[in-house]
Image: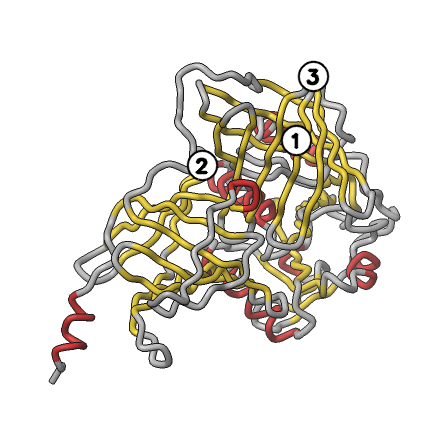
Amino acid sequence: MLDALNLIRLLKKIPPGIWRGELLLDRTPVVKYGDDRDIVKKDDIESTVPFNFEVVYDNDSTFHIVMHNGTERINVPDVQFKTDPYTNKDTVIIDFPIYDTQIRAIYEDGIMEGDWIVNYRDDYRIPFKAVHGKGHRFNGVKREHSDMAVNGSWETVFTEEDGNTFKALGSFYQKGDSLTGTFQTETGDFRYLEGMVIEGKMYLSVFDGSHAYLFIAKMLSDSTLTGTFRAGSKYKATWEAKRTDKNSLADAYSMTKTTGKPLSFTFPNQDGQPVSITDQKFDDKYKIIQIMGTWCPNCMDETVFLQDYFKNHPADDIAVISIGVERYKDTLKSLSMLKKFKDRMHIDHDVLLGGYTGDRASVVKALEIDGIKSFPTLLFADRNNKIVKIHTGFNGPATPVYEDFKKEFTTILEQLRKD
């Protein structure tokens, strides 16, 4: 029989509805003692990644999470609410299995406190807190008219702490003080950003289980933007931007080169069984080879595109093969991640393990290219397994160029068949 304490816990529920979460980039975890030793720190908007999510009940006892970033909604079904046997505390565990990360937090009186844990990095965790019933993102008062106008396109240069730079194209959509948008880069986009203008500064953030990004900027007297970019607790960069009506990023079809030799690779699938591009099932077919990683949100966006495209345009003469380059050296762990990815994404084409991100030489050689410049990268091959076109990176549905890419993809397939 259940004792009274366990019965109370069984009847407890995480409140449904909207929540406001925070990832505290510059804070170490604080132990809560429940007395005057507790440490209370003032929220720092400059180092906090805010985000919103919903708790949605499937029935009386089970629920899932819906992440909010701009117009995107991500269903997260892997959620547990239980008593931790070590702490004896009510604990929420939110798993992002495709990215191999999780939120683990103690729940009490409409508040979750714990950490976002990145399993593929050694001892990498960021303090997390969430409060029920809070629908705002940044702590500011929204107004219909803003004192800072950033709507439109911005030619951007990011400068990393080691002095390296990279170009981007910022696309921002502003209504009053409310902001959404993204940055396109030559290797992919920063997905769905959301935020607002507060006292002459713009703030944008995203958290989707993989990305934890925070962008801040102010406008200078010459109408340019200058700001900072935080990615997790370790990465920092600065950025400068000016208005533009042009896209000066490198052509995605010219960044990666082929050796010109036909493909003849063999890699293991998610079950460890060898699959070769020269297998009979690929005979007399055009091939689309996707170089990806299960840890890569842009790769997931591209995978969704490929699935949707061939669902709407079935093609028996085309074979899609995804080749994962994973963050684990351990082959069995990497195969496990590929299996989760294939199952969760309901992928019906071959998903193979190409190797480890820290040692790409063998997969680069096998794919007859001059390097992996971006995850994802698409290789288009003819019936003789010769690469005829390469698309580097993926600027997905959060960007204004996504519709152009969909048209280009169709054109490439038409040309592939003609040749």
Q: Earlier in the sequence, mark 2 or mark 3?
A: 2
Sequence-first tag of 3 and 1: 3
Instruction: Tell me the amino acid under the disc marked 2.
Output: Phe
Looking at the image, is 53 positioned above or below residue 30? Answer: above
State the residue position of label 1.
Answer: 414
In the rendered image, residue 291, in percent from the top left (x then y), is placed at 68, 52
Secondary structure beneath disc 3?
loop
Residue 345 or residue 282, whichever sits in front: 345
Image coordinates for residue 194, horizontal then vertical, percent: 49, 34
Q: Which residue is mark 2?
A: 138
Mark 2: few/some/many CA within 10 Å (<14, 14-19, 20+) = many
Instruction: Look at the picture and state if 290 lies above or below 171.
Output: below
- Label 2 close to label 1 by CB (< 8 Å): no
Q: Which of the 4 image quadrants contains residue 336?
A: bottom right
In the rendered image, which residue does mark 3 sit on?
A: 244
State the image coordinates of residue 38 (x, y, percent, origin top left): 40, 64
Report the amino acid beneath label 1: Glu
Foreground: disc 2 or disc 1? 2
Residue drawn at (78%, 31%), measured in percent from left and top? 250
Along the line of sight, the residue nearer the viewer: 402 or 104:
104
Q: CA distance from mark 2 to mark 1?
A: 47 Å
- 78 lies above or below 239: below
Asked whether the viewer can see residue 15, the reply is: yes
